[in-house]
Image (cartoon, helix red, strand yellow):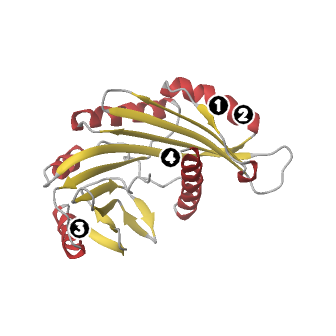
Protein backbone atom coordinates (compact mmCIF):
# COMPACT_ATOMS: atom_id res chain seq x y z
CA UNK A 1 0.00 0.00 0.00
CA UNK A 2 2.80 2.45 0.90
CA UNK A 3 4.66 1.61 -2.32
CA UNK A 4 1.50 2.16 -4.37
CA UNK A 5 0.88 5.56 -2.76
CA UNK A 6 4.48 6.68 -3.39
CA UNK A 7 4.31 5.46 -6.97
CA UNK A 8 0.98 7.22 -7.54
CA UNK A 9 2.35 10.46 -6.09
CA UNK A 10 5.37 10.44 -8.39
CA UNK A 11 3.16 9.69 -11.38
CA UNK A 12 0.85 12.55 -10.45
CA UNK A 13 3.76 14.97 -10.04
CA UNK A 14 5.18 13.87 -13.39
CA UNK A 15 1.78 14.21 -15.07
CA UNK A 16 1.03 17.56 -13.47
CA UNK A 17 4.45 18.97 -14.36
CA UNK A 18 4.01 17.89 -17.98
CA UNK A 19 0.41 19.11 -17.99
CA UNK A 20 1.36 22.58 -16.74
CA UNK A 21 4.20 22.72 -19.27
CA UNK A 22 2.00 21.81 -22.22
CA UNK A 23 -0.84 24.16 -21.28
CA UNK A 24 -0.53 27.85 -20.47
CA UNK A 25 -0.84 28.00 -16.65
CA UNK A 26 -2.58 31.38 -16.49
CA UNK A 27 -5.13 30.41 -19.13
CA UNK A 28 -5.43 26.74 -18.31
CA UNK A 29 -9.18 27.10 -17.82
CA UNK A 30 -11.33 29.99 -18.90
CA UNK A 31 -12.76 32.29 -16.14
CA UNK A 32 -16.05 30.44 -15.76
CA UNK A 33 -14.45 27.04 -15.17
CA UNK A 34 -15.75 26.89 -11.59
CA UNK A 35 -19.40 27.20 -12.69
CA UNK A 36 -21.42 24.05 -11.97
CA UNK A 37 -22.64 22.60 -15.32
CA UNK A 38 -26.09 21.55 -14.08
CA UNK A 39 -27.75 20.92 -17.46
CA UNK A 40 -24.78 18.92 -18.71
CA UNK A 41 -24.74 16.73 -15.57
CA UNK A 42 -28.48 16.14 -15.87
CA UNK A 43 -28.04 15.04 -19.47
CA UNK A 44 -25.36 12.53 -18.49
CA UNK A 45 -27.55 11.16 -15.69
CA UNK A 46 -30.26 10.41 -18.26
CA UNK A 47 -28.01 7.94 -20.09
CA UNK A 48 -28.51 4.18 -19.82
CA UNK A 49 -26.62 2.58 -16.94
CA UNK A 50 -26.08 3.38 -13.28
CA UNK A 51 -23.95 6.32 -12.16
CA UNK A 52 -21.77 4.75 -9.45
CA UNK A 53 -19.31 7.55 -8.66
CA UNK A 54 -19.07 11.31 -8.86
CA UNK A 55 -15.62 12.82 -8.55
CA UNK A 56 -14.21 16.35 -8.37
CA UNK A 57 -10.55 17.29 -8.47
CA UNK A 58 -8.39 20.40 -8.38
CA UNK A 59 -4.64 20.52 -8.95
CA UNK A 60 -2.35 23.50 -9.07
CA UNK A 61 1.29 24.46 -8.87
CA UNK A 62 2.23 27.13 -6.34
CA UNK A 63 3.59 30.06 -8.44
CA UNK A 64 6.73 30.55 -6.37
CA UNK A 65 9.71 28.53 -5.21
CA UNK A 66 9.41 27.47 -1.58
CA UNK A 67 12.02 26.77 1.05
CA UNK A 68 11.57 23.49 2.88
CA UNK A 69 10.65 25.41 6.05
CA UNK A 70 7.93 27.40 4.29
CA UNK A 71 6.55 24.32 2.55
CA UNK A 72 6.25 22.46 5.85
CA UNK A 73 4.76 25.47 7.63
CA UNK A 74 1.98 25.72 5.01
CA UNK A 75 0.78 22.29 6.10
CA UNK A 76 -1.03 23.81 9.10
CA UNK A 77 -2.82 26.35 6.93
CA UNK A 78 -4.02 23.62 4.56
CA UNK A 79 -5.16 21.44 7.44
CA UNK A 80 -7.28 24.27 8.80
CA UNK A 81 -8.68 25.19 5.39
CA UNK A 82 -9.80 21.67 4.52
CA UNK A 83 -10.30 20.48 8.11
CA UNK A 84 -8.19 17.42 7.22
CA UNK A 85 -5.20 16.17 9.18
CA UNK A 86 -2.18 15.91 6.85
CA UNK A 87 0.34 13.22 7.74
CA UNK A 88 3.82 12.81 6.23
CA UNK A 89 4.28 10.18 3.52
CA UNK A 90 7.65 8.42 3.28
CA UNK A 91 9.67 8.85 0.10
CA UNK A 92 13.20 7.55 -0.49
CA UNK A 93 15.68 10.42 -0.34
CA UNK A 94 16.70 10.02 -3.98
CA UNK A 95 13.19 11.00 -5.07
CA UNK A 96 13.68 14.54 -3.68
CA UNK A 97 9.99 14.70 -2.78
CA UNK A 98 8.23 15.83 0.40
CA UNK A 99 4.59 14.86 0.78
CA UNK A 100 1.72 15.23 3.22
CA UNK A 101 -1.53 13.34 2.70
CA UNK A 102 -4.87 13.31 4.45
CA UNK A 103 -8.43 12.24 3.90
CA UNK A 104 -11.70 12.31 5.77
CA UNK A 105 -15.33 11.50 5.20
CA UNK A 106 -17.65 14.47 4.88
CA UNK A 107 -20.70 12.19 4.70
CA UNK A 108 -21.45 8.46 4.69
CA UNK A 109 -20.97 8.38 0.91
CA UNK A 110 -18.40 11.10 0.30
CA UNK A 111 -14.74 11.63 1.17
CA UNK A 112 -12.21 14.39 0.55
CA UNK A 113 -8.50 13.71 -0.08
CA UNK A 114 -5.71 16.28 0.04
CA UNK A 115 -2.09 15.95 -1.10
CA UNK A 116 0.48 18.66 -0.42
CA UNK A 117 3.60 17.74 -2.35
CA UNK A 118 6.98 19.42 -2.91
CA UNK A 119 9.44 18.49 -5.64
CA UNK A 120 12.98 19.79 -5.33
CA UNK A 121 13.95 22.21 -8.09
CA UNK A 122 16.55 20.52 -10.29
CA UNK A 123 18.81 23.58 -10.55
CA UNK A 124 21.46 23.57 -7.81
CA UNK A 125 20.56 26.18 -5.23
CA UNK A 126 21.59 26.90 -1.64
CA UNK A 127 19.40 26.64 0.34
CA UNK A 128 17.28 24.07 -1.50
CA UNK A 129 14.13 25.28 -3.21
CA UNK A 130 10.96 23.35 -3.97
CA UNK A 131 7.97 23.56 -6.24
CA UNK A 132 4.73 22.94 -4.35
CA UNK A 133 1.67 21.12 -5.70
CA UNK A 134 -1.79 21.07 -4.15
CA UNK A 135 -3.92 18.10 -5.20
CA UNK A 136 -7.48 17.71 -3.91
CA UNK A 137 -10.16 15.16 -4.73
CA UNK A 138 -13.73 14.70 -3.56
CA UNK A 139 -15.48 11.45 -4.47
CA UNK A 140 -18.93 10.12 -3.63
CA UNK A 141 -21.82 8.04 -4.84
CA UNK A 142 -24.81 10.30 -4.14
CA UNK A 143 -25.79 12.52 -7.06
CA UNK A 144 -27.80 14.84 -4.78
CA UNK A 145 -24.58 15.82 -2.97
CA UNK A 146 -22.53 16.52 -6.09
CA UNK A 147 -23.44 20.18 -6.51
CA UNK A 148 -22.92 20.86 -2.80
CA UNK A 149 -19.47 19.29 -3.01
CA UNK A 150 -18.67 21.45 -6.03
CA UNK A 151 -19.61 24.60 -4.08
CA UNK A 152 -17.70 23.36 -1.02
CA UNK A 153 -14.46 22.84 -2.96
CA UNK A 154 -14.82 26.08 -4.91
CA UNK A 155 -15.30 28.16 -1.75
CA UNK A 156 -12.33 26.64 0.05
CA UNK A 157 -10.02 27.34 -2.88
CA UNK A 158 -11.33 30.88 -3.30
CA UNK A 159 -10.83 31.54 0.42
CA UNK A 160 -7.23 30.46 -0.05
CA UNK A 161 -6.89 32.90 -2.97
CA UNK A 162 -6.56 30.02 -5.40
CA UNK A 163 -8.47 30.21 -8.67
CA UNK A 164 -10.51 26.98 -8.83
CA UNK A 165 -9.67 24.71 -11.75
CA UNK A 166 -12.13 21.94 -11.25
CA UNK A 167 -12.32 18.70 -13.17
CA UNK A 168 -15.27 16.38 -12.76
CA UNK A 169 -15.78 12.76 -13.69
CA UNK A 170 -18.77 10.45 -13.57
CA UNK A 171 -18.49 6.67 -13.69
CA UNK A 172 -21.38 4.80 -15.29
CA UNK A 173 -21.78 1.02 -15.06
CA UNK A 174 -23.47 -0.76 -17.95
CA UNK A 175 -24.84 -4.20 -17.17
CA UNK A 176 -23.27 -5.75 -20.23
CA UNK A 177 -19.81 -6.69 -21.40
CA UNK A 178 -19.37 -4.75 -24.63
CA UNK A 179 -17.15 -5.81 -27.49
CA UNK A 180 -14.63 -3.22 -28.71
CA UNK A 181 -16.86 -2.53 -31.71
CA UNK A 182 -19.80 -1.76 -29.40
CA UNK A 183 -17.60 0.38 -27.14
CA UNK A 184 -16.49 2.39 -30.17
CA UNK A 185 -20.09 2.90 -31.23
CA UNK A 186 -21.12 3.84 -27.68
CA UNK A 187 -18.40 6.50 -27.38
CA UNK A 188 -19.18 8.00 -30.76
CA UNK A 189 -22.93 8.04 -30.03
CA UNK A 190 -22.30 9.65 -26.63
CA UNK A 191 -20.16 12.39 -28.16
CA UNK A 192 -22.92 13.02 -30.68
CA UNK A 193 -25.63 13.20 -28.00
CA UNK A 194 -23.50 15.72 -26.08
CA UNK A 195 -23.04 17.75 -29.28
CA UNK A 196 -19.30 17.15 -29.13
CA UNK A 197 -16.62 16.85 -31.79
CA UNK A 198 -14.06 14.07 -31.39
CA UNK A 199 -10.45 15.27 -31.67
CA UNK A 200 -8.42 12.23 -30.60
CA UNK A 201 -8.96 8.50 -30.17
CA UNK A 202 -6.84 6.04 -28.14
CA UNK A 203 -7.42 2.30 -27.89
CA UNK A 204 -5.64 -0.68 -26.38
CA UNK A 205 -6.72 -4.11 -25.17
CA UNK A 206 -8.16 -2.83 -21.87
CA UNK A 207 -9.65 0.59 -22.59
CA UNK A 208 -10.61 3.26 -25.06
CA UNK A 209 -10.23 7.02 -24.53
CA UNK A 210 -11.79 9.70 -26.71
CA UNK A 211 -11.35 13.43 -26.21
CA UNK A 212 -12.92 16.40 -27.89
CA UNK A 213 -14.91 19.56 -27.44
CA UNK A 214 -18.54 20.49 -26.77
CA UNK A 215 -20.25 23.87 -26.50
CA UNK A 216 -22.36 22.40 -23.68
CA UNK A 217 -19.53 23.15 -21.19
CA UNK A 218 -17.98 26.58 -20.73
CA UNK A 219 -14.55 25.50 -19.45
CA UNK A 220 -11.80 24.08 -21.63
CA UNK A 221 -8.07 23.54 -22.00
CA UNK A 222 -5.96 24.25 -25.06
CA UNK A 223 -4.20 21.25 -26.58
CA UNK A 224 -2.36 21.46 -29.88
CA UNK A 225 -4.02 24.86 -30.41
CA UNK A 226 -7.48 23.31 -30.10
CA UNK A 227 -10.07 23.61 -27.34
CA UNK A 228 -10.60 20.39 -25.37
CA UNK A 229 -13.20 19.95 -22.63
CA UNK A 230 -14.61 16.44 -22.86
CA UNK A 231 -12.99 13.04 -22.36
CA UNK A 232 -14.73 9.68 -22.41
CA UNK A 233 -13.30 6.26 -21.67
CA UNK A 234 -14.56 2.71 -21.53
CA UNK A 235 -13.10 -0.15 -19.51
CA UNK A 236 -14.16 -3.76 -19.32
CA UNK A 237 -14.84 -5.44 -15.98
CA UNK A 238 -14.64 -9.05 -17.08
CA UNK A 239 -15.09 -10.51 -13.57
CA UNK A 240 -18.44 -8.76 -13.12
CA UNK A 241 -19.39 -8.85 -16.80
CA UNK A 242 -19.80 -5.08 -16.99
CA UNK A 243 -18.48 -2.18 -19.00
CA UNK A 244 -17.59 0.98 -17.09
CA UNK A 245 -17.86 4.31 -18.88
CA UNK A 246 -16.08 7.38 -17.47
CA UNK A 247 -17.11 10.86 -18.61
CA UNK A 248 -14.86 13.74 -17.58
CA UNK A 249 -14.48 17.45 -18.19
CA UNK A 250 -12.28 19.20 -19.09
CA UNK A 251 -10.15 16.05 -18.57
CA UNK A 252 -10.70 12.69 -16.92
CA UNK A 253 -9.52 12.55 -13.30
CA UNK A 254 -6.53 10.22 -12.98
CA UNK A 255 -6.28 7.74 -10.11
Mark 3 surroundings within 10 Å by alpha-carbon count, few (fewer than 14), some (14 through 19), many (20 or more): many
The one nearer the camera, 253 or 35, is: 253
Residue pictured at 58% horizontal, 53% vertical: 7
Mark 2 surroundings within 10 Å by alpha-carbon count, few (fewer than 14), some (14 through 19), many (20 or more): few
Disc 4 designates what residue? 59
Question: Could you say which quadrant of the image residue 193 lies in?
Answer: bottom left
Labelled pair 1, 2 in contact (Cβ < 8 Å): yes
Residue pictured at 72% horizontal, 46% vertical: 130
Disc 1 designates what residue? 74
Which sits earlier in the primary sequence, circle 4 or circle 3? 4
Can residue 37 be seen here? The reply is no
Secondary element at image label 4: strand
Secondary element at image label 2: helix
Disc 2 designates what residue? 70
Disc 3 designates what residue? 187
The one nearer the camera, 246 or 235, is: 235
Amino acid sequence: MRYRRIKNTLLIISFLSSFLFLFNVENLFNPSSNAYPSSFISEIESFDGTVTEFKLAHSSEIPEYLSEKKFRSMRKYLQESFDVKLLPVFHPSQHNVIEYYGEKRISDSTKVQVKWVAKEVSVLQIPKKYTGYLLTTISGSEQDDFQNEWVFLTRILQNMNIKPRINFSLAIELNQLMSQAKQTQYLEDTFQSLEGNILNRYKDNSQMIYDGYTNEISSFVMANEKKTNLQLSTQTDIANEKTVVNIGSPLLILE
